[in-house]
Image (cartoon, rainbow, N blue to C red):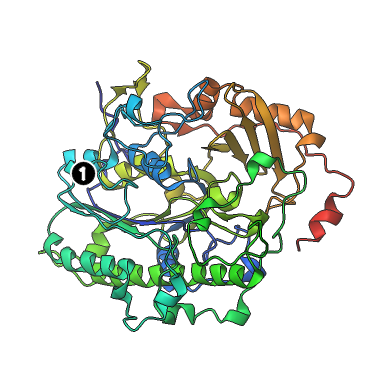
Amino acid sequence: MFALPSIVDGETQAKKNVMIFMVDDLRPQLNGFSSTPKLHGGKQMVTPALDQLGAEGTIFERAYCSVPICGASRLSLLTGSRPYKEPGKDWGRHWTYYSRLDEADQTTPAGVNHPGVTLPQHFKDNGYKLYSIDKVYHNKDDDKDVWDDLVKVQHPWQGVPAFEIGEGDKNDDEAYPDGANASDVIAKLNGLKDDRFLYCVGFPRPHLPFWAPKKYWDLYPEDSIELPSNYSLPVNAPRQSIHNWGELRNYSEVDYEDEMKSRVTDEYAKTLIRGYYATVSYVDAQIRRIVAKLKNTYDSNGVSLYDKTVIVVWGDHGWNLGEHTLWAKHALYNTSTQIPIIIRDPDVGQGGRVSALVESVDLYPTLCDLAGLDRPVTTIDNDGSAFNLHGSSLLPLLKNPEASWKPAVFTRYDKGDSVRTERYSFTEFTNVADEVTGRMLYDLKFDPNENYNIAENNPELVSKLSQLLGTNPTEKRNAWRALVDESQNNSPIAEDLNLPEAIHPNDYEQVLARFD
């Protein structure tokens, strides 16, 4: 057993507080994320608090979740561990919907006997007070005994007309869970002035149902809402890449265009898009309230909590707003997998913009470094191998946004595995026998919205990317290891992948022009 030290320029960082804003279903189309494809019609959401944190901190413009579903994505961050598919099984350890930490593997499809120390437990072991509110782990009983203060909020996830609630008589921010959560955090910060704390603040919006006071809906007039330009299936997309948005179908008030319920009406689609924008602005206002409290709360030495707290904004996955006919998440397109990450540290990274490819699993080691903590000791994984954190600390990028970095990131969901490089997005779908049943390849340089699958036109490029991804479940589970130096705390290996230039079909430009 040995500890992995957190060293910055030869000196251990002073310990700081950490506050993580965990925002459900938050897409990265925020102001300041300049390299991210724009929202429908170039729309900008109203998010002044997030804009300010981005201006004072570092924006990671190309961040990806490990799994585009709530429980597993959160578990990946909080354990510092990647998901994987076990050979011959539909579901692998670490990525069911509930992602239980406290159940044995045999009792659920993916109950997690996690071999390491969770992020909250590690901070607890290092003398931090731990506070959690609302949706941190998806299953609110996971790691429940580690928190000094745990506020569990139950939500009626389905069957509620969201917009009508927003029009109700009691229409202040605290009428809804996100506003009430912010008030709870604000009240408790008074008692943490001189403590070191890790505060995980879960915001359930912009997850369905779209609850928000009317004033946030009013930020987006009905006639300003546009449908996506790619409100249609991608060209040559494999059937496995598209789902029937079961999460949305839970809601009784959905208006469908046809008897088969294959598409919502355009009017209802615009209501959904408007509701998403409104709830993002609502959450932004709650973050503003908490940040203001940090700025105006001082320790016994007269230092504000804002000046001694690392603030992280993290979305657990994306959310489809009609692109590719999809709603919700649960897919391997960028609209489901790409997330926002903002890190505001009092001492490093002000005003940074990072275009390097990063992942949710990178946050655990990053927070160890920023808080001045050694990393967890090596433990033994379920297969007998040594387990250390799977991510790479983002500290080099906080200090220098142009620092050399790993050339690819990995995401998986259901029967699909994806790898993204600076230019390409590649996914393979397999069956229970681990045989490839479909592939999709998008050239993000020319097709950032992933509208034309060119896998069939590029056998050499597909072969290279397939090798990078891995050709069987074991290789896919460990594909990330080839891109880091594990002997140096997973320091990224910035090597050229030597991928061939993509070959585009004859009608490529003509077809893509339809989506402009």
State the image quarter where residue 297 is shown. bottom left
Picture layout, residue 365 above or below residue 258: above
* Frontmost residue, 386 versus 332: 332
Q: What element carries label 1?
A: helix
Residue 219 point in image, percent of width and height:
50, 80
Residue 441 as seen in the image, left or right of residue 55 = right
| Extreme residue in the right direction | 506
Q: Report the quarter where the C terminus lies.
A: bottom right
Residue 29 point in image, percent of width and height:
55, 62
Q: Which residue is drawn at 22% across and 72% down?
A: 296
Q: Residue at x 69, y 28 (%)?
A: 464
Picture layout, residue 353 above or below residue 479: below
Residue 127 point in image, percent of width and height:
14, 43
Q: Which amino acid does label 1 sit on?
A: Lys
* Frontmost residue, 157 versus 69: 157
| Extreme residue in the top direction | 384
Residue 112 point in image, percent of width and height:
34, 31
State the image quarter where residue 456 is shown. top right
| Residue pointed to by mark 1 | 144
Count of numbered circles in the view: 1
Residue 114 as seen in the image, left or right of residue 503 = left
Q: Report the quarter where the N terminus lies.
A: top left
> Can I make out residue 344 in this image?
no
> Can I make out residue 458 in this image?
yes
Residue 131 as seen in the image, left or right of residue 365 = left
Q: Assess disc 1: are there few (<14), some (14-19) or many (≥20) residues with their C-alpha within 10 Å of its C-alpha.
A: some
